[in-house]
């Protein structure tokens, strides 16, 4: 089957598909700038929302691997600001695998519109991870640490702050030096929306009343934090997978920890900074994703078949549905719902 036929006509973004290290498809669609008709290209940088958690997770594991941190270290012993009613005994492992119970500034179990966050605090003030602290610091704990798995954005904000505390540099500078540059990911970084470098796509939300697209610049953090917000390209994501598995980022021991199931609920499996799809009993396919107003991203790597699929959209297309169709075709398996 021609893979291109599986991609919706209205798709706007970029797609990379590789099998056995060979490119099956690497193509851009639609526009980076809709108004000025500037097309997306394969090296266009796209916002990726929560996809950045995988980079933060890898960065924390590097620090543990180097002996600068441990899974059992607690936030009360690392962070130097008043945690108020937040449990000071929450440890690094619980932050990494979303079992901390820390109050989530964007609780996706009860909120579905990220732009709701900026009713009281302007989004243009969010330029560092520390700037998000007022959004959760006065909230109560959600549950006792370690009690259950519940996806949590605040946990990764704190992981970013922990990197900053230990390394004495902004978390995104640490990631640039220790992950992006070693992997050759020259077009990946955390950029301010009012200071974007060249080749960055705008992200658009569709106004169903006026029947037109508008920029998401008032709907998301002006700069990404530990919870997400990296800009990247489909080419750089391919480089990330390649270097993750060849040992550039982590040793084999810590890669295995990252890709092993560390927490779960009825529907989901999670490692450290990365989702896991159980393809057969005890065998997992790693993947990571992001979803913000005007932003949708997914990337997966089937270790057994050596198939990677990365799809990014800057108008919020349903990348998950497209990915399922493509993967079902490539792996000759029944399409997931």
Image (cartoon, rainbow, N blue to C red):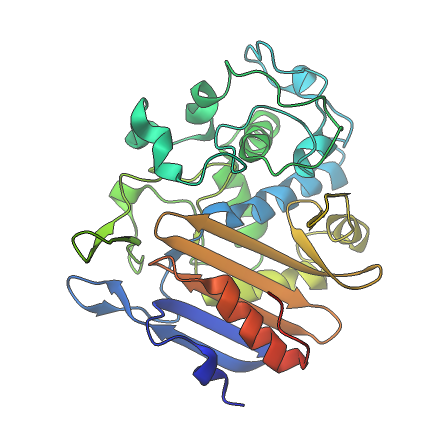
The reply to whether residue 68 is visible in this rendering is no
Q: Quadrant of the C terminus?
A: bottom right
The reply to whether residue 179 is visible in this rendering is yes
- The residue lying at 46 percent from left, 30 percent from top is 129
Front residue (pair 192, 90): 90
Furthest toward the bottom, the residue is 1
Q: Position of residue 108 (x, y in %)?
A: 51, 38
Front residue (pair 275, 82): 275
Furthest toward the right, the residue is 281
Q: Position of residue 157 (x, y in %)?
A: 53, 31
Q: Position of residue 121 (x, y in %)?
A: 32, 23
Q: Position of residue 211 (x, y in %)?
A: 19, 58
Front residue (pair 227, 328): 328
Q: Quadrant of the N terminus?
A: bottom right
Is 41 situated above or below 298?
below
- The residue lying at 56 percent from left, 44 percent from top is 53
- The residue lying at 58 percent from left, 50 percent from top is 179
Is 93 situated above or below 205?
above
> Is 318 on the left or on the right of 120, as rendered?
right
> Is 172 on the left or on the right of 204, as rendered?
right
> Is 41 on the left or on the right of 311, as rendered?
left
Is 44 situated above or below 217?
below
For residue 219, what is the image quadrant? top left
For residue 244, what is the image quadrant? bottom right
Q: How many marks?
A: 0
Is 55 situated above or below 308?
above
């Amino acid at each position: 089957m021609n893979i291109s036929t599986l991609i919706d006509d209205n798709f706007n973004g970029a797609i990379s598909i590789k099998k056995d290290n060979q490119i099956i498809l690497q193509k851009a669609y639609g526009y980076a700038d809709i108004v000025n008709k500037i097309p997306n290209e394969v090296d266009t940088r796209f916002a990726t929302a929560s996809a950045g958690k995988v980079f933060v997770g890898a960065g924390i594991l590097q620090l543990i691997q180097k002996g600068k941190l441990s899974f059992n270290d607690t936030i009360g012993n690392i962070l130097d600001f008043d945690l108020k009613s937040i449990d000071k005994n929450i440890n690094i492992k619980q932050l990494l695998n979303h079992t901390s119970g820390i109050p989530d500034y964007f609780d996706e179990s009860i909120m579905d519109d990220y732009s709701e966050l900026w009713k009281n605090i302007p989004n243009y003030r969010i330029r560092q991870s520390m700037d998000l602290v007022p959004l959760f610091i006065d909230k109560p704990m959600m549950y006792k640490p370690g009690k259950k798995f519940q996806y949590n954005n605040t946990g990764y904000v704190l992981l970013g702050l922990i990197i900053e505390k230990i390394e004495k540099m902004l978390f995104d500078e640490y990631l640039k030096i220790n992950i992006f540059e070693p992997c050759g990911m020259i077009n990946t970084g955390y950029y301010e929306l009012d200071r974007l470098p060249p080749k960055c796509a705008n992200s658009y939300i569709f106004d169903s009343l006026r029947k037109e697209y508008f920029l998401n610049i008032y709907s998301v953090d002006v700069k990404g934090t530990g919870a997400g917000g990296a800009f990247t390209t489909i080419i750089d994501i391919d480089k990330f997978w390649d270097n993750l598995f060849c040992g550039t980022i982590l040793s084999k021991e810590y890669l295995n920890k990252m890709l092993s199931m560390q927490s779960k609920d009825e529907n989901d499996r999670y490692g450290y900074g990365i989702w896991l799809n159980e393809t057969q009993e005890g065998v997992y396919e790693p993947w990571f994703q992001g979803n913000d107003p005007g932003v949708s991203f997914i990337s997966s790597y089937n270790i057994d078949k050596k198939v990677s699929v990365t799809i990014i959209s800057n108008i919020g297309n349903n990348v998950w549905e497209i990915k399922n169709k493509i993967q079902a075709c490539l792996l000759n398996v029944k399409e997931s719902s």
